[in-house]
Every structure is written in C-alpha cells, then in structure tokens.
Amino acid sequence: MGWYEDHILPRCIDWVMREERFSLLRKALLAEVSGTILEVGFGSGLNLPHYPAQVTRLYALDPSLTGRRLARSRIEDAPFPVEFINPQADRINLPDQSVDAAVSTWTVCTLPDPVSVLREIRRVLKTDGRYFLLEHGLSSEGGVARFQQIWNPVQKWIGGGCHVNRKIDSLVTASGFHIESMKKFYMEGPKFLAFLYQGIARPG
C-alpha cells in the first residue's frame, strides 16, 4: 500500500463514513447478527457501536494499520473481544465453518479479487451461518450505470482501488452463496456513488 492509501485515505474514509446516514444503514443491517462474527473490511471500526448484544466475539480483517489506530477507542468500548486476523484477503486464517456470521460494509468494491474473498467467507461460515452485506455498486438504472463505467478509472485512482461498477449480487452468487434477501436502492448522495446493495446470503 502506498503512503496515500495507508495514511490519508483511511482518515478521509473514517471522517466521511461516520455520518449519521451511514450509521442508520449500519444499524439496520446488523440488527440480526449474533454469535462469533467475521468482519471483512473492518477499517476504523465504524460498525462496532451498531452490533447487538448477541455478538460474543469479532474477528477483524483489514490491511490498514492506520485504520486499526483510528479504531482503538471503539474497540475499547466494545462489549465483546475484537481480534485482528491475517490481512491476506485470499486466505482467511480461520478454520472451516468456524463463524456464525460474516459482515462486509462498503468493502467488496475495493477487493482485488472479490470472488476469491467471498469464497473464503463462505468457507469459514457455519452451514447455517449468514453473510450480511451493505455495499455500493453498479446501478440498475441504465444512464447511471453507463456513467459509472466511465467514472470507474477515476474512482479507482482516488479511492484506493474502489470500484463503482461492480454488480454485487452477481459476485455473491458467483461465489457459491444463496441470496436470502437483497434490497437495491439509492441512499442520499450522487447517484453514481450512492447505489446500494443491502442483503443477507447463506452458503450454497
């Protein structure tokens, strides 16, 4: 990771993504999460205040050391232990079928090989586990989607590899998940950045 991606970008993301509009979406997504959790794309721990009391442990996966530092106070306030695991996204250092739920929020957009990572998430989920996701991606609206394809190289440059043109539900099913529920909608903001996929998937 370069200096910008490791030092500047995590602080910018933490500042923007702590806004109330994002917090409300996080709280809604995480309401049913329970047990032992894997969070991929932990960042600065912005999901931590929104996990319900039923969560007993969280494994955090993120390559950003700056993000970990920004998360320090949130980790200290968490009512459950938070343990960082290896940041190599192509192999999650957990046994097969070892977590009750997995979570990703605004993360799949940046993964270099999203299908490989999603397959790893599926591997570590218990057979009755669930994957909770809240991601931005390719719009269902043709004109917006066309602009996203044009804008995407710029987004990757300023966003540390972030893509705005990924069809998240297709990536999830291509990874062997069965989608239990999926809402697609625009949140407040520019349409090409604000098209969201909010859903729950189970290992197929």
Image (spheres, rainbow, N blue to C red):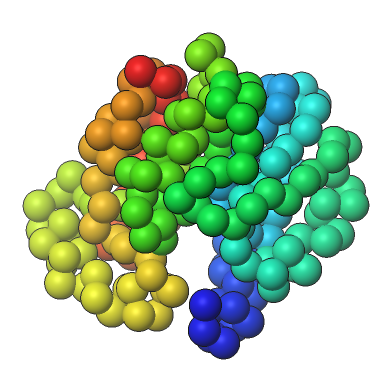
- From the viewer's side, name the closer residue of 142 and 39: 39
Judge whether 14 appears above or below 60 on screen. below
**33 versus 20 height, above or below:** above
Classify residue 65 by image quadrant: bottom right
Provide residue 72's location: percent of width, then percent of height.
Answer: 83, 61
Q: Is residue 65 left or right of residue 156?
A: right
Residue at 15%, 49% in the rendered image: 141
Q: How many marks?
A: 0
Residue found at x 31% / y 52%: 137
Q: Is residue 199 above or below residue 50?
A: above
Q: Where is residue 27 shown, x and y percent of the image?
A: 63, 38
Residue 167 image point, x, y percent: 24, 46
Is residue 111 something one can see in this rendering?
Answer: yes
Q: Residue at x 41, y 51 (%)?
A: 108
**Residue 37 sits above or below residue 14 on the image:** above
Q: Is residue 26 visible?
A: no
**Which residue is located at x 69 percent, y 23 percent?**
34
Quadrant assignment, res 154? bottom left
Residue that lies at the very extreme toward the top in this rendered image: 128
Query: In which quadrant will I find the C terminus?
Result: top left
Between residue 6 and residue 19, name the one nearer to us. 6
Q: Nearer the viewer, residue 84 or 189?
A: 84
Q: Is residue 124 left or right of residue 109?
A: right
Looking at the image, the residue that sits furthest to the bottom is: 3
**100 left or right of 106?**
right
Tell me residue 134's x, y (percent): 46, 42
